[in-house]
Image (spheres, grey):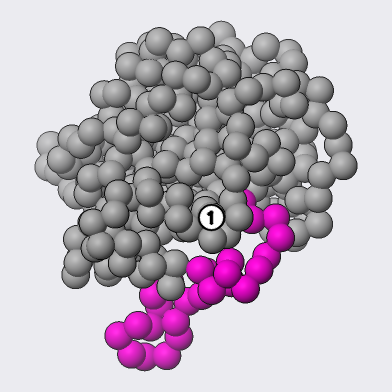
C-alpha cells in the first residue's frame, strides 16, 4: 500500500471543496482509496444492487440492502490497516454455514436488523475504522437490478446480467426506490463528480437510474469525469466502446453531462465522435495490471480538473 502515502501537493484537488464518486465494486473502492487524502471532502455513492457472493446469500435468506460494495469501499479507503479493519474484512473459511461470509457484511446486516438506518450504520463503522470520507448507499431500501433482453424477456439480478451472452436492450431497478437524501445533498454540493471505473452495467449505471440522482446530475454545474477501466470487462458490456458507454450514460440521464474521460494508454476508442476532453495516461498498478495505480490515478484526475 506504499502508493497510498501522500507527499504530493495536488494543485487542483487541494482546492476542491467536494468530490463525489459514483459506482461500486472494487473500482469505486480503488478510486476512493486513491483520493483518501481528501478525507471529509470526498463522498462515495455506492451501488446497492449486488446479489452475489456473501451479500447475495444474506439478501436471499434475510432480505435487506446489498452491503458488500459498501464494506469494500470502507475497507479500501483505510490508509493504515488495523485490527479493526482486518476484523471487518475477515472472511470465514471451511464448509459450514458461515463459509464464504464476510464478517463486515454480517456486522452491517446486524445493524440493519437492529432498525438502525443504513447511513447511521455506515457512520458507526466509519468511526470504528477511522474513515473520514463519507460513504452513502444509493438507496436505503432493498433493490435489484433488472434488464430487458433483445427478445423482450426480462431478467432480474446483477449476477444474471453479468453472465448474459448478449447486451441487454435496457436496464432498470426493481422496485424503483428512493435515493438516499444525503447522497443527493452531496451531489448538489459537488464541484467534481466521478463515474467509474468498474463494471459498467452493474456498478456504474444503477445509481444513475434513480430519478433523484438523474435530476441532480442534470442540474449540477460540477465537472463530470468518466474513468475508464484498464481491461475489457468479462460481461456483455465488453461489446460497448467507450463512446457507446458515454452515450448510454447520457441517454440514461437525459442530457449530455460528461465533460471528460480518463483512459489508459492502450485505449483504442478516444471518443472522437463526442465533444469531450480525453486524457490518455498510463494508469496500471505494478502488481495487478487491471487495477489503477492510486498515485497515477489521483494525479491524472488533478491534471484533468486543471484543464476543464
The residue beneath circle 1 is 127
Q: Which residue is drawn at 46% across and 27% down?
A: 186
User: Relative to 205, does residue 89 appear above or below in the rendering?
Assistant: below
User: Relative to 153, does residue 223 appear above or below in the rendering?
Assistant: above
Q: Can residue 272 be seen in this view?
A: no
Say which quadrant the N terminus sits in. Answer: bottom right
Q: Nearer the viewer, residue 181 or 201?
A: 181
Q: In this view, does 259 lie to the left or right of 293?
A: left
Q: Is residue 227 left or right of residue 50?
A: right
The magenta segment? 75-102
Q: Residue at x 72, y 36 (%)?
A: 298
Q: Nearer the viewer, residue 162 or 139?
A: 139
Q: Residue at x 62, y 73 (%)?
A: 83
Q: Is residue 108 magenta?
A: no
**Percent position of residue 15, x then y:** 72, 21
User: Relative to 211, does residue 137 appear above or below in the rendering?
Assistant: below
**Percent position of residue 20, x then y:** 53, 30
Majority secondary structure in the magenta region: loop
Q: Is residue 101 magenta?
A: yes
Q: In this view, does 153 lie to the left or right of 11?
A: left
**Percent position of residue 247, x then y:** 42, 20
Q: Which residue lies furthest to the left in this view?
A: 153
**Percent position of residue 122, x then y:** 43, 52
Amino acid at each position: 500500500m506504499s502508493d497510498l502515502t501522500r507527499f504530493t501537493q495536488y494543485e487542483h484537488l487541494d482546492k476542491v471543496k467536494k468530490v463525489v464518486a459514483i459506482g461500486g465494486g472494487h473500482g469505486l473502492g480503488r478510486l476512493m482509496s486513491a483520493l483518501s487524502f481528501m478525507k471529509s471532502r470526498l463522498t462515495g455513492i455506492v451501488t446497492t444492487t449486488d446479489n452475489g457472493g456473501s451479500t447475495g446469500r444474506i439478501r436471499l435468506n434475510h432480505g435487506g440492502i446489498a452491503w458488500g460494495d459498501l464494506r469494500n469501499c470502507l475497507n479500501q479507503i483505510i490508509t493504515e490497516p488495523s485490527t479493526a479493519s482486518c476484523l471487518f474484512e475477515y472472511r470465514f473459511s471451511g464448509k459450514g454455514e458461515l463459509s464464504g461470509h464476510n464478517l463486515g457484511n454480517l456486522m452491517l446486516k446486524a445493524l440493519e436488523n437492529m432498525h438502525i438506518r443504513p447511513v447511521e450504520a455506515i457512520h458507526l463503522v466509519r468511526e470504528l475504522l477511522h474513515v473520514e470520507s463519507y460513504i452513502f448507499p444509493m438507496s436505503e431500501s432493498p433493490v435489484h437490478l433488472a434488464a430487458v433482453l433483445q427478445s423482450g424477456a426480462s431478467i432480474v439480478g446483477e449476477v444474471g446480467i453479468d453472465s448474459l451472452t448478449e447486451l441487454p436492450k435496457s436496464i432498470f431497478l426493481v422496485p424503483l426506490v428512493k435515493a438516499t437524501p444525503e447522497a443527493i445533498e452531496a451531489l448538489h454540493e459537488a464541484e467534481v463528480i466521478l463515474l467509474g471505473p468498474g463494471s459498467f452495467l452493474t456498478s456504474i449505471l444503477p445509481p444513475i437510474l434513480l430519478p433523484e440522482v438523474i435530476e441532480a446530475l442534470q442540474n449540477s454545474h460540477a465537472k463530470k469525469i468518466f474513468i475508464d477501466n484498464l481491461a475489457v470487462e468479462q460481461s456483455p458490456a465488453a461489446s460497448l466502446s467507450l463512446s457507446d458507454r458515454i452515450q448510454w450514460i447520457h441517454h440514461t440521464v437525459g442530457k449530455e453531462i460528461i465533460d471528460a474521460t480518463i483512459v489508459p494508454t492502450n485505449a483504442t476508442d478516444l471518443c472522437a465522435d463526442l465533444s469531450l476532453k480525453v486524457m490518455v495516461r498510463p494508469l496500471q498498478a505494478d502488481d495487478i495490471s487491471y487495477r489503477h495505480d492510486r498515485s497515477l490515478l489521483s494525479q491524472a484526475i488533478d491534471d484533468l480538473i486543471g484543464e476543464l
